[in-house]
Image: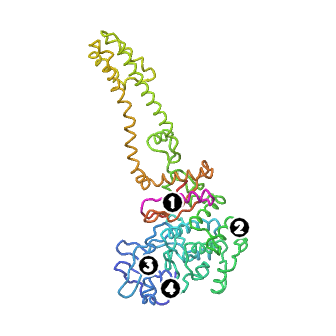
Amino acid sequence: MVVETDPDPLIGELLDGRYRVVSLLGRGGMGNVYLAEETRLRRRCALKVLQPHLAQDRAHVERFLREAQTIAQLEHPNIVDIYSYGEEPSGVVFFAMELLTGQDLDARLKARADDPFTTHDCCVWGVQIARAVAVVHDAGLIHRDLKTSNIFLARRRDGEEIVKLLDFGIARPEEGSELTKTGVALGTPSYMSPEQIRNVAVDRRADIYSFGVLMFKLLTGRLPFTGEPIQVAMQHCEATPPRPSEAAPAAEISPALEDIVLRALAKRAGDRFQTMTEVEQALVAVLEDEAPEFAPMLRPSRIATQSSLSLRPGGSRPDTRPTTIPPPTLPELARDAATTPSLSNATPPAPRRAGLTRMLAVLTIGSIVGTLALVGVVMLAPAGTPPDPAPTIRPATPTASRPEPRPAPVEAPPAAPPVVAAPPVVVAPPAVATPPAIVTPPVTPPPQPAKPPVAAKKPEPAKTEPVDPLKQVQAKAQACRRKHRAVDGAKITIDYAVGIDGKVTRSIASVADELGNCLADAVRGTTFEPKVVLGKKIAL
């Protein structure tokens, strides 16, 4: 709580006709934060008000309001919520956001002696930060100011702590993200990446470097580089960071956790983690190995909530398995195999087709044999005994277990009397001409059904690709596994995003080997429904 010697002119004021300013909560570089009451809904909120001297510059006003718009577009439990923003005729510029109870990570670090926390607590916070920043990156933005003072530990009514990402004042789109037109680097020097300090174009990996600095400070209680701002900036560009275990021997930092921090702090962007999702997965793996009791805290994961595209339960991590979907039973699998083609293997329906083919062949042969037998009986039978062919016909089809579907041959004897009525005509062609009419119907239908599918094959490819992209991905995944001889291997999770044109803009495998790269390429080469889809995962 900030103690004011002079009364603040905003205390008691009504902004936008509904926000009554109650008290000052804190000061920041661009603005002050006040406790306010929304008079219409009678709920408390926080107001961030731009500093009066900055409100006179329209560029600062636009940047301040852009921060509110940026946060409002990002919906995630670990990102602070924005309610509204406005400008008063008096020149006051503000935005209203959710009121958080708790403390930022800077304050928590200072109170570590009285309220201690472990390296695994740091991992839990790091996982939540990584998830929040991943949402920012999926929206095509770079935060550019990750630091402990911009991470808030909010305490809910049930006592649970949850991380909230704050302060998007200098966030920018990732595409063509130069720092400033004037060449002035924006950010906090102690947390800035080498490329950010050099004032060159940056991407999401600059945030990953800042995250490494943040985790280093959480684990050790100090920054990796200290000194004057210019000295710190030079060290970020050239000096090798100290190992966290050497900077804080008493903290008992595991080698796996130390490797995560050092990889995030790599000077070259290509040597770091390439996405915050990779950072999240690495931290989750450390917790699973070293502190499985923290697993319940990690359940509200982006992986678990976005796994609806996984066709099979996959992944080696508990939070990557869609536990709400029971495995299919054998009757269900049999039913599915009978109605739809299999996604994982195209061979199971073959035995059914082979069986049907054999049955049709047997029935066709049986009908031909029966017809020939009928012809022979008609030609050899006496003129006055027409009922005798009936018992001759049934034994003529012993191979067909169900002769009832073929009653047509039985109707031939009634047609025989006109032919037999004239003894000289019994051997004549008319008696032979009727059986071909009977043989023709079962022979001609097989070619006829075959022709329409040939004509219908042209529209099918155009309809299958856009309608079922997941089937295409699974087919390509099977080809990858056969190529790398890993058909029965463990599933690999692919983290991907889809652009507005349906093309995949990001595809990263959880396992960076040849099979993982092949699966990632399979997803990248597939066209999905034309709409923006962020932070999706599929197990292949």
Q: Quadrant of residue 286?
A: bottom right
- Residues at circles 3 and 2 in contact by the CB criterion of under 8 Å: no
Query: Within 10 angstroms of label 3, few (less than 14), some, or many (20 or more) residues?
Result: some
Residue 352 lies left or right of residue 249; in this view the side is left
Q: Secondary structure at mark 3?
A: helix
Specify the segment rendered in magenta.
Answer: 510-530
State the residue at coordinates (37%, 19%).
375
The amino acid at mark 4 is Lys
Dot placed on the residue nearer the N-terminal end, 3 or 4: 3
Residue 522 colored in magenta in the image = yes
Mark toward the viewer: 1 or 4: 1
As drawn, the label of residue 66 is 3
Dot placed on the residue nearer the N-terminal end, 2 or 1: 2
State the residue position of label 1.
Answer: 525
As drawn, the label of residue 41 is none
- Residue 103 image offset from top left, x and y in percent: 55, 74
Q: Secondary structure at mark 2?
A: loop
What's the distance in space between the residues labelled 3 and 2, CA to CA? 42 Å
State the residue position of label 2.
Answer: 252
